[in-house]
Image (spheres, rainbow, N blue to C red):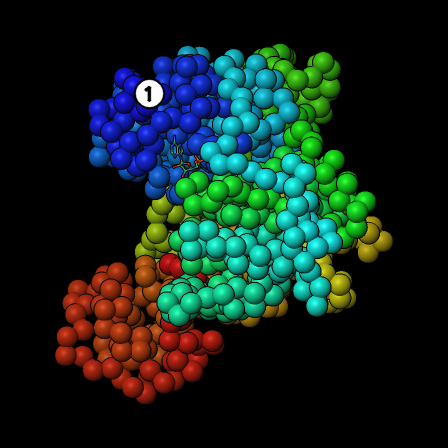
Amino acid sequence: MKPTDLSTLPPGVPEALEDEGVAELYPPQAEAVEAGVADSESVVASVPTASGKTLIAELAMLSAVQRGGKALYIVPLRALASEKRAEFERWEEFGVDVGVSTGNYESDGDWLASRDVIVATSEKVDSLVRNGASWVDDLTCVVADEVHLVDDAHRGPTLEVTLAKLRRVNPGLQVVALSATVGNADEVADWLDAALVQSDWRPIDLKTGVHYGNAINFDDGSQREVPVGDGKKQTEALVADALDERIDGQGGSSLVFVNSRRNAEGAAKRLAETTSRRLDGGEKNDLRELAAEIRDVSDTDTSEDLARCVEKGAAFHHAGLASEHRSLVEDAFRDRLVKCISATPTLAAGVNTPARRVIVRDWKRYDGEFGGMKPLDVLEVHQMMGRAGRPGLDPYGEAILLAKDSDTMDQLFERYLWAEPEAVRSKLAAEPALRTHVLATVASGFATSREGLLDFLGRTLYASQTDDDARLAEVTNRVLEYLAVNEFLDREGGALTATGIGHTVSRLYLDPMSAAEIIDGLEAGVSTAAEQGSLRGSPGGHGSDGEGEGAEPVGADVTAEDAGFVTGNELAAGGDDADAEVDGDGVPDEGEPGPEVTQRAREVTPLGLYHLVSRTPDMYQLYLKSGDRETYEEQFYERESEFLGDPPSEFEDVAFEEWLSALKTARLLEDWASELDEDRIAERYDVGPGDIRGKVDTTEWLLGAAEQLSTELDLDCTVAVREARKRVQYGVGEELLDLAGVRGLGRKRARRLFEAGIETRTELREADKSVVLGALRGRRKTAERVLENVGRKDPSMDDVRKDASVSAAATAAVEGDDDGGQATFGDFS
Ligand code: ADP
């Protein structure tokens, strides 16, 4: 079957596909078309990695759009959203508008109504439904990428419930689910009322084997000699062997999967010695340029380590890298410039980075719940192995596991090479998952009674897989009890309704347990402060600004009580895709509560708030490493008065340890909000820049939510919460809050202006331009942009000479401020 055989696509698309090299549809693609994927039929495609699942989705979406419909593509990871958008944007010339929904949870993304194809994560779609996005009703086609992730305890339930809701809103909806090869794709297809396309077909042959001794033993019985010895390790020998085997003049690249970030970095450093001996002069030059680009992304140790590896032709890849780092590495690997990547399994999921040889070095990973090293799932190992073989470049792909003895080799053959992947099992009937989804389902009007709720849950994969209906009912009862006790739900007679706070919690996308913890903590903080006699009148009215319009949940009966709730879009850190705004509600500023509040803000400290949000289930805490316990125990006693809520006793082992982990996380945030340099933080807490960014983003979101809860409950700490949030958002101390809100300024430049005596926006508007230019180290364009953004009438820097004395003093004041200082994400505003 050829693309031009398809009559459902927008005119021009079939020819464009052929121009891209899709002469024939791959067999699973043709099967999907026969099953009606281009004619509004639901299809589950369970096929190996790299066998063209994306095109199946595109055929469905483009045909839907051509029929006048609207499509949604659900990605499993935020990082993949922009990648998919970029991929689909090539259809814009055929009249298909593409939009990606990232950004904050509590917006309704109404601008997406004008797009034909929308890309979003399942969490984002869930929140859009909760916020009543109008266009959800118009969807005619939904694609769920990597649908086997419904098996994931953390994220699976959201995907499952979201698909159930979308199908409920829109009974005729076409669902296209893309899955790796799993043990029970038929069950997934049954659940979705979809046709099943199941295939083992791959565009390029895959040889799998185990390296043991001095050879790879392939599953087809063949062997390839790859000797180790002379201190050479298995991985190094295999990477070298692939590079030395020239096919059409080209050596083969390798992808090495390991079980931790540290191991990924360590392996890349060692493998760089192997790759560097096999580079020609041109490659060395190109790699030096690439290394420079990597250094430009950020000034951290991780960035430097990566650049050093890349100069030698190797790289590491894990979730702690900045996204710019990740895409530079992926592109260079696809261009065959980087010869070897050592990666954690994030790379196996979704990113298209084929290699001639895949080496699965670690097949066990530390698992806290398991209590030790746990073997990876077959499905996961198969997905890694599926990255082997580049169509058109390699004769076949090779995927290799490593064994140190023959018993292990036998075990690996049985466990992974000859084994079928596991069945996908719903994880919905777990309390944390149901807590969130039961509240949201009631709040957005999908169920108004316990029976209605159970009926809705009956449409999930869980229900279709279980024989034990009683279990779901039992967990649901427990969850309803929890939600009622915490006053998120009212249960009167047989009716279920969300309370005002319950609606807010659902819209804010908080785990109800996080919300309960935050409310308790804030109440405790406020009452302690009140006991100390420092509280005065309430700073703000309750729900008075009418921002609730347009945010009613789907189908909910919005009571008069709900109608006035603040959605807080203006309080949150920026709407969809928004850059940090010039901030009208900077703290403390004109029109904001006066000195009493600043006094009160001291009772509820930023550290107390950072700790509070760090102990909610919505924050991934930092682990305590060896030696950390003493450090944080000491700080626990030093900072005890700042904690919001009662700490556990030292004898409650697990709870106390968690409290200390939250303290470690809170200390990282405090360091960030005290302008400590990113690389110092990375070193102190042993994390990557991506982790810091992740913690900062999560904290901003959770404190934004805390701020709204505080306003709605009329707690006297809204200002303190807002201040703590803004300090994290900008990464600055209290005195810089006003300046740091200027768009395009960033924390380091704000600090330099401050040190040069320009302390507020008002002062910046009037300041001597030569001082501004000096503080900004002679960068005219930057200075002009900053002055323009702060609203200065005449921002031009023509004929201004920088005040050199200012420049030197200001630069000295900013730590770690090399010339490319603005490139660190510390200056992301
Ligand atoms: P999957 O999502 O199944 O892992 P992809 O959709 O990323 O795989 O496809 C892998 C590669 O195969 C992509 O580079 C894609 O452009 C290419 N491809 C897909 N279908 C065809 C086809 N019919 N002919 C040629 N190349 C194809």
Q: Is residue 550 visible?
A: no
Q: Is residue 792 visible?
A: yes
Which x, y percent locates residue 203?
47, 33
Q: Image point 70% across, 55% down: which residue?
A: 214
Front-lying residue, 715 or 370: 370
Determine whether, in the image, residue 14 is placed left or right of residue 568: left
Front-lying residue, 597 or 445: 445
Q: Image point 71% across, 23% down: which residue?
A: 475
Mark 1 lies on a secondary structure that is helix
Badge 1: few (under 14), some or many (20 or more) residues near its Cα, within 10 Å? many
Quadrant including the C terminus: bottom left
Ligand 1 placement by image quarter: top left
Front-lying residue, 817 or 753: 817
Q: Which residue is mark 1?
A: 64
Determine whether, in the image, residue 412 is placed left or right of residue 151: right
Which quadrant of the figure has residue 588?
A: bottom left
Which quadrant of the figure has residue 409?
A: top right
Quadrant including the N terminus: top left
Which x, y percent locates residue 737?
42, 63
Q: Image point 53% across, 32% down: which residue?
A: 48
